[in-house]
Image (cartoon, coloured by chain):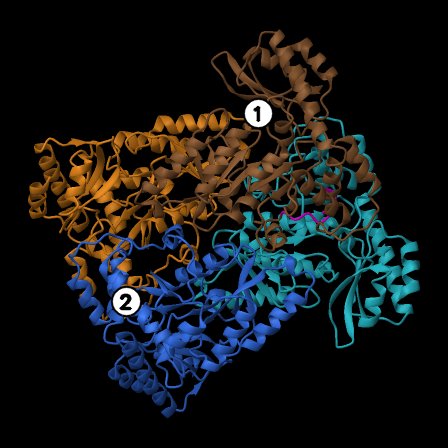
Chain colours: A brown, B cyan, C orange, D blue
Amino acid sequence: MISFENDYNTGAHPKIIEKLTMTNLEPYSGYGDDKYTKRAKEKIKKICGIKNAEVELLVGGTQTNATVISTMLNDDEGVIAVDSGHINVHEAGAIEFTGHKVLTIKGKDGKLDAKSIKKYMENFYNDRTYLHMVIPGMVYISHPTEYGTIYTKKELKEISEVCKAYKMPLYIDGARLSYGLMSKKSDISIKDIAKYADVFYIGGTKVGALFGEAVVFTKNNRPKNYITSIKKRGALLAKGRLLGIQYDTLFTDNLYFEIGRHAIDMAEELKKVFKEKKYKFYIDSPTNQQFVIMKKEKAKNLKRHVAFGVWEEYDKNHVVVRFVTTWSTTIEDINELKKYI
Amino acid sequence: MISFENDYNTGAHPKIIEKLTMTNLEPYSGYGDDKYTKRAKEKIKKICGIKNAEVELLVGGTQTNATVISTMLNDDEGVIAVDSGHINVHEAGAIEFTGHKVLTIKGKDGKLDAKSIKKYMENFYNDRTYLHMVIPGMVYISHPTEYGTIYTKKELKEISEVCKAYKMPLYIDGARLSYGLMSKKSDISIKDIAKYADVFYIGGTKVGALFGEAVVFTKNNRPKNYITSIKKRGALLAKGRLLGIQYDTLFTDNLYFEIGRHAIDMAEELKKVFKEKKYKFYIDSPTNQQFVIMKKEKAKNLKRHVAFGVWEEYDKNHVVVRFVTTWSTTIEDINELKKYI
Amino acid sequence: MISFENDYNTGAHPKIIEKLTMTNLEPYSGYGDDKYTKRAKEKIKKICGIKNAEVELLVGGTQTNATVISTMLNDDEGVIAVDSGHINVHEAGAIEFTGHKVLTIKGKDGKLDAKSIKKYMENFYNDRTYLHMVIPGMVYISHPTEYGTIYTKKELKEISEVCKAYKMPLYIDGARLSYGLMSKKSDISIKDIAKYADVFYIGGTKVGALFGEAVVFTKNNRPKNYITSIKKRGALLAKGRLLGIQYDTLFTDNLYFEIGRHAIDMAEELKKVFKEKKYKFYIDSPTNQQFVIMKKEKAKNLKRHVAFGVWEEYDKNHVVVRFVTTWSTTIEDINELKKYI
Amino acid sequence: MISFENDYNTGAHPKIIEKLTMTNLEPYSGYGDDKYTKRAKEKIKKICGIKNAEVELLVGGTQTNATVISTMLNDDEGVIAVDSGHINVHEAGAIEFTGHKVLTIKGKDGKLDAKSIKKYMENFYNDRTYLHMVIPGMVYISHPTEYGTIYTKKELKEISEVCKAYKMPLYIDGARLSYGLMSKKSDISIKDIAKYADVFYIGGTKVGALFGEAVVFTKNNRPKNYITSIKKRGALLAKGRLLGIQYDTLFTDNLYFEIGRHAIDMAEELKKVFKEKKYKFYIDSPTNQQFVIMKKEKAKNLKRHVAFGVWEEYDKNHVVVRFVTTWSTTIEDINELKKYI
């Protein structure tokens, strides 16, 4: 059965599997003390255009969000996020588990905007009781967002400026970063991300790795003894080499971006197919996640032939369904999908 | 350079790499909702001899300890461990990070004994101020221990009985379980472990997997909505299939035990070599970790040819060094080691 | 200067001061092991009409909310509250500090309603990804609410029924309980509160005590070793007698309710005075907190003569101001206020 | 019945009760925004000899320890304490509840010494795996200790020097500070405490207040927005005036030190009485806690006439019992005690 269920439904890009196989018998100390990890970190710094960036490799996205946010917030602080943000909805309370509140702002199409953040901050400090409330200490955005939308360079710059004005680091969740950067609508590069974000991560799990997320601290702001903080959260991989090898491979010959480009191309094909069949889109997404409005009956039947996600009810007769492309999506998959929709 | 540095210094057993490669393109839902995970869990239940055991697959050891302990303790409780226990020393405070205290008892050769636990509990409840102290709510032991020693069936049974008397679950950290079970000195089976422990884990990371630890709840005692609790700790792997495939492979054709047996055989050869050269052992370990007393000068020189761990100072002129065997250790490695020591 | 700033701006009701003075030299064991505490607990059980209720006396409201909520939630759970709820806004993230999320539902006039909770729960369990989200495990309401409004018996019953249907305990924050019960608009008694709530607290700090909140577990549902859990949160008062003496006094000769009645009477007078002067009310509050719309200029001048709270901006020229009555408010205070507004 | 059970078994010193009564009707904003709190803080700064010290008033000892320690430690750090330290034994895991480990060093008579701390630190940083362990980030001592013993100026200075060398703040738990300072054996003043400690607290609960502990940050090192951090821990008293009034009174006419002196005088009388009757002391305590070795039978009988604490078993026939003096202990109490022992 063909699958558009998500971007982590297959294993890893063959080049990664190949490299893991080739290096399998080489012995290394654990916990990231190996040549591949060192090399991967150097490549990431270079591609971000920040010589003294600090890079840490972790296993998963929720783990990464909880680790970064909880180690960068002060005791009195919480993190601002859009209400639909991953940390607010789909991480089972991982941020709160570390003792910090997620402060939500209503967003549009999964995005926060500078104006709303500014207004939130002004209201906050105008409230004479603000010391009895959680102090906003960081801004979290995801790029692309949970709805597949992306920020423009201008939007990013404005958000970054509000953050600076209030001395709040800006953290960008890049679980699907490659798809955002390779979107036909994108006007930003990874260097822009590195410039505007105080810390961000380059997602691997959803971009062709078996697992892995590379956190980049861009402003000499990595907390002290970070390995200890990672370990304390159960997030330190014994065979750290696995992360090093994967990121070394992803940043060899532009693989990370090639994977993104391919998935975007497939997403464009996918859109075409749905448009031909007169489907309406729930949201105009320029990345690898496509949200389509489908008759309930149709969705039910389609499930027999294709794996995809049912997102939410749209109206009495329709549901919003999600189709996702990734490195392993083929044009054949899309042609076959076409038969059933 | 040959390496006896630890049991996670190489990749995965070739059969695991092979299986990961073969299944790489098969699409599955994430988070353990795949056929390999289901099959792995069934195999584990069968080998433990407990039909209705509940099995959860996690990524790493510290993560597993923190997840199991913090979800099984009541709010008022802490976990008893030997002072040298992994959770007390080398997990960067991961248990405390979840809000619970590690209550230590002085041990011998890395082991706890039933008598000491009993005495601890009697003293505790005889103290009229005990409600102002952390209530002991679980006992943690590792098998084999951090010093490579193992429990006998009688010792395990006695500890289990004290635990039952005080209604404390017994949790066995089996990071290196296979090496304990396959030790020439062992009189216990995995079924014994499953019988005496209320919850334990079958370590994969140190026994031939890329990563992975299989937690087994043996008494219908898995907390509710465990996926949520795992996710909340950042411990839920998106591509859960990777854990399923690895454990399915480890429990096919006895691979898990074969790996243990091989490492034990290699450890016996290693011991021979050191004994021939008149080295003294710091501890009499019947498993894959061997602690040898070595002249400081010698250890320093040996580092040029062999990777191994310097454990601690023994006296002014000697250090304790650790040599570890694993699935990838070969007789050639040991023959080469012989040249240098 | 006269003050309507809040209901904790003076010391304690004279009867409490008197009793503390009289008992000052009597020696007692600490931590609530004294005859006054025992007696207070018995009186509370009696007045609640629940023989085997379990009562715990704590110092402050935020402390009480955090202790009750975090000890009653399972690991995977969070607490539902109205967006304006005290735990969501004005407790500096005390709930999140214990590792649990506050799940918000938009309310009206500070109140939650059964229908909204039901809809939230239905949507939650209809979402196929719900195990990746925080499981709703408790419902928190305050009575009266942060806006001075109160629930009717019917509303309370309906909320209680939804809670039961989803096996979520209902927790009522009674920081100002007396004012709710003694409101002219109230159709509920403390026995009703005890019947519908699974746990609630009878606020002392805001009702004439120096400090103190009495938690009542109504369904044999107090977690084990509660003293340990209280101590662990730094919430166990050494001289527990102080809580016992205060609650014993509050529940002697109906003092707790007399204080409420007096404050309500004063609030009604206060309303009259504002109405005479043609002020508009921001909200129709039947309790001791009154929210009035006032010209900014007026509010600024009034500050010179009267202490009160500026709540929030109403429009360009107006602010919402809060006037609060309490046990120490006198008719003279109100007459004097009349001169200035 | 006379009581030597502890130093918090009666109410407050009459001067405090008097002041609370006198000020009862004065209205103040809550949370410490009142003239008494301001005045108390000024007096404390003056008596400590540190103009720009920062003072915070909290309610109880465990609460204070948990708040101070958890807000001053970095994420990767734990706190060093002697094994018998209050935070390690009798606070129900309050430090661990905040996510930090208590790192213990074996002490003598309840005291830590500079040499042991130094050795601990050297061993720690010599261990190549130290990043996998909890980083020592603070030293906690209590003065007097839990056994009534005190540090000399020299000892304090040495400990302070080790702390400085390793950049660890030194925190002194002064729950019974007055008794330490007024001990006949003491060679240190409160100014010495303020000089050597980076943060310490002046205990009120056990020195004549109803409750209250005054934290002094001596090195411009109070964390930001401390009210928020206090509130987040449920430790912010609504009627903050109560703390202000009590500390203002304690530091008027040397009351705080007079209370200490009186209790020490009474303790000396108590010692005489026991010595006359040939009792042996378990420990040589120069403060208000006296530990006496008593026949079990005797202790049992004595309980009928006198309240005191049974500390621990000494041998088959004897127990260690504790007698404590305080502001309310009278010479008549001691004379009566004499009759029964």
Query: Which corner quadrant holds the C terminus of chain D?
Result: bottom left
Q: What kind of element bears circle 2? A: helix
Q: Which residue is mark 2?
A: D247
The answer as to whether the residues below labels 2 and 1 share one chain is: no
**Residue named by callout 1:** A148
Quadrant of the frame with the N terminus of chain D:
bottom left
Residue A53 vs residue B260: left or right? left
Q: In the image, which residues are magenta?
A: A235-243
Residue depicted at x 15% and y 35%: C184
- Give me the chain letter of mark 2: D
- Whether residues under marks 2 and 1 lie with C-beta atoms below 8 angstroms apart, the answer is no
> Quick one: label 2, few (<14), some, or many (20+) residues within 10 Å?
many
Above or below, A266 against B267 in this view is: above
Q: Nearer the viewer, residue A55 or A246?
A: A55
Q: Position of residue D289 (x, y in %)?
A: 38, 78
Prevailing secondary structure class for the magenta stretch in the rendered image: loop
Q: Amino acid at mark 2?
A: Tyr
Judged from the image, the secondary structure of the residue bearing numbered disc 1 is loop
Report in which chain the residue with disc 1 lies: A
Q: Does the image show residue D210? A: no
Q: Residue B45 appears in which quarter of the rendering?
A: top right
Please state the horizontal and vertical placement of residue C312, each as a whole percent of the image.
Answer: 27, 37
Residue B87 seen in the current view? yes
Decide if residue A264 is on the left or right side of residue C150. Answer: right
**Mark 1 residue type:** Gly
Image-based side of C337 in relation to A300, left or right: left
Q: CA distance from mark 2 to mark 1?
A: 58 Å
Relative to A121, D132 lies left or right: right
Q: In this view of the protein, which residue sits in the foreground, B74 or B245? A: B245
Is residue A239 rendered magenta in the image?
A: yes
Q: Position of residue C57 (x, y in %)?
A: 32, 54
